[in-house]
Image: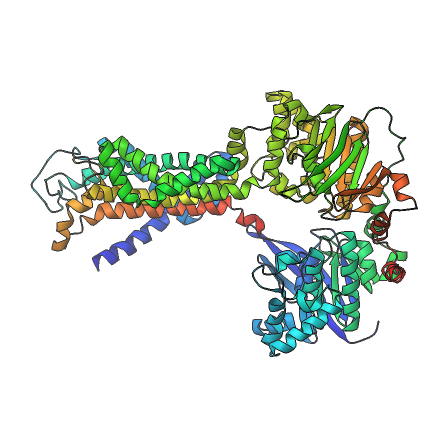
Amino acid sequence: MGVLIFLVLFIAASIPLSWSFRAGLARVLPRHMKSAARDMPLTAAFGIMVIAVYILVAIFAPLLAPFPERAVVGTQFQPWDSTHLLGTDRLGRDMLSRLIYGARNTVGIAFATTALAFLVGSLLGILAALRGGWLDQGLSRFVDALMAIPSLIFALLLLTIFGTSVLTLILVIAAVDATRVYRIARSVGEGIVVMDYIEAARLRGEGNWYLIRREILPNALAPLVAEFGLRFCFVFLTISSLSFLGLGIQPPTADWGSMVRDNATLITFGNVTPLLPAGAIALLTVAVNFVVDWQLYRASGLKEQVG
Amino acid sequence: MTGEVLLEIRDLHIEGRAGDDWLPIIEGVDLTLRKGEVLGLIGESGAGKSTLGLAAMGFARDGCRISRGEIRFDGIDLRKAPETQKRRLRGQRIAYVAQSAAASFNPAHKLIDQYCEVPVLKGIARKTAAAEAVTLYRKMQLPAPEEIGFRYPHQVSGGQLQRAMTAMAMACHPDLIIFDEPTTALDVTTQIEVLAAIRDIVRDYDTAAIYITHDLAVVAQMADRIKILLRGCEVEEADTRSMLAAPRADYTKSLWAVRSFARPETPAPAGPPLLSVQGVTAGYGKADILHDVSFDIHPGRTLAVVGESGSGKSTVARVITGLLPPRAGAVLLEGQALPPDYRARTRDQLRQCQMIYQMADTALNPKLRLRELIGRPAQMYLGLQGRKLRERVRELLDLIELEPDSFIDRLPSELSGGQKQRIGIARALAAEPKLIICDEVTSALDQIVQEGILRLLDRLQRELGLAYMFITHDLATVRAIADDVVVMQHGRIVEQGPKPRVFAPPHEPYTELLLSSVPQMDPDWLTNLLKARA
């Protein structure tokens, strides 16, 4: 019941907040971006607002957190009070501080991983579509082979071989996800490379890099952006599951996935604290997808087709 | 014409959504159609012809709404009728034949299955419907009427598909058929067959029809009366013969005058050819598409390559540009053999020969602004940068008669069809080529816009001394712009030479067929032609 009331209150509060955020954006932004800000739906404004808050929290974590990330500052499982606003965890570390540092670690790593996966996957996918022939065959079959191995097992395997540092974590998850991005980029690219403007550019004597960068990528952006939103959430979950298995972000680094697991016992006592990191993940997921939906709507030119 | 009024439209207003506003598409058009009468609707694209045609079914496209006026079909008010009643009317009493039959048929079902759908819904037994289909296929003069229904849409030609679609529309003996540009996408020779079939069947079944087109000569064969639309308003309406004989409005007169563009004769070429195609045989896979094709293009002249679809005329362009290396033969540019594959050609060889495409929509990258679209070839081939490049783009926009300041930062989606084609021309010019290959550049455009493009190309040729290779199936265009003509059929050259010689009798049989298939303004032309051919 309490959760329900909280949800209703949260949504009720977020509507005027996003509305004023949008109005503020429209006022602050330079002229050519103003109309985009004014026309964006409330959901997108909400999404941007949430993402902005997450980024700010991640950047200014040391300033915002009342206690250090790793220090034991109290007894185990203290309830919410005025010193420890969200209580303490099973080792006596401050929950709120860890939640704030978690934004930096989890979001940062997930973003870096997704970005890397997209850079590699989409470039190779489009290149394969553009060149065709043996390059396409070789890359595609290699990706097929990688995808035939269950991704979690594959990631576990690589992490055991290369060890568990943040860098290998990013590289391994990016490698696994890049295969999915590759397939999407390739199929989108196949549809674009048969267009006359690609033929025209080829006949002009353009190189591969120009073709990918200026002719194909701008037209493939809409589906790729949509996939980015989804992939970002999946990476989040992968990191959490790897952390759960002890191969993800290593303690004592604060990470939302492992925070849920570590404090899960509290739920049996009717305490909602372990749900907060999970909620933070959920909120970011929703926010990212609101923004992605809006971008998709803008990029797909739905407005122009009407009439 | 006297007879019962079948369709009556009064003071119709239709609006389309543009952002938060509603812009008018049709502004107060009246229309009366009697039983068994054929009305021709003419206008440029964007005039609201199709919207009006759909409104006759009580239908408005997504994003459009009928804001005012009255539509009565056989006494039923279509604006007030419930959706279920309208749905019953559509398909059974009102039918619609779309421009592209290929896009309107479901590729996964056989023709006859798609035919039977509506009759079966109406309660006719499937066997009876199928038998009726064969009768209609025969009436539409489709080959092998008993069997053709069991083919899939991709297994029959475009003209046959268009006729199969008309047969489908006739399935329930509707009172009214709306034809939305049914022959625009077809070759002249195929067009005749479809026109004749449509005309006969409409007469036999005494069906009323609205025939939408932008081709005056076509409508002159089909319609009893003609209505002309301009930007959603009616310009004038009269019966066909008096309209053709004495158009009243200025706009109508300008429509009539379009086909009059012709350039003066040029003297015979002297000196060596710019481009020479010698004994080219080429094809895909095992099949040869071109057989021993040879011709020359001279500097400053226009060579038109004419033929039906499938005659190999676009393949010639692919061989010249190097997209399809030939099996035998060679392409010589100024006496020097060009490497068969474009990837082996030097940048300068690529620059000399530019291409303009049929569909400007797919030939321009929708995400690039005109600044880059036009500027890129100049930047790449001529090494222009910064201010010089900007100046050059402005110069090119001036050359194609578009105002630089308002166009330079636009996206292709912010241009009309004719303007897009002009950008295609500017992009080709930016490379400062000697030869431009124009692949059906006007066939997707309205006649008035077509004429503008042809005049522009003609002016550019005189000013810049360009040579054109003009691939087309439209002989009116050839008459207007060509110096030399190559007639192709089944991958072979049937006839070639200077235009006056090719177009003067005696003709090769195939040239004769092509020439006689071009619709004339005379409303008796089709009747006479069919009589003569019979």
Q: Is residue B354 left or right of residue B221?
A: left
Residue located at (43% from left, 47% from top):
A293
Give whichever of A1, B178 is nearer the camera: B178
Left or right: A74 as drawn, with respect to B68: left
Number of marks: 0
Residue B241: where, in percent of width, then height? 88, 61
Q: Position of residue A133 (x, y in %)?
A: 51, 37
Q: Residue at x 19, y 46 (%)?
A: A260
Point 60% across, 76% down: residue:
B126
Q: Which residue is the extreme one toward the left?
A: A75
Indicate the position of residue A240 as horizontal and vertical percent values. Answer: 24, 43
Residue B33 sits in which quadrant?
bottom right
Quadrant in the picture for residue B529: bottom right
Whether B447 is drawn above or below B165: the answer is above
Pinpoint residue B524: horizontal percent, then vertical percent.
88, 61
Give left or right: position of A252 versus B479: left
The quadrant of the picture occupied by the N terminus of chain A is bottom left
Q: Nearer the viewer, residue A115 or B402?
A: A115
Residue nearest the observer in this picture, A33 or B478: B478
In the image, is A209 to the left or to the right of B430?
Answer: left
Q: Where is B157 relative to B478, above or below? A: below
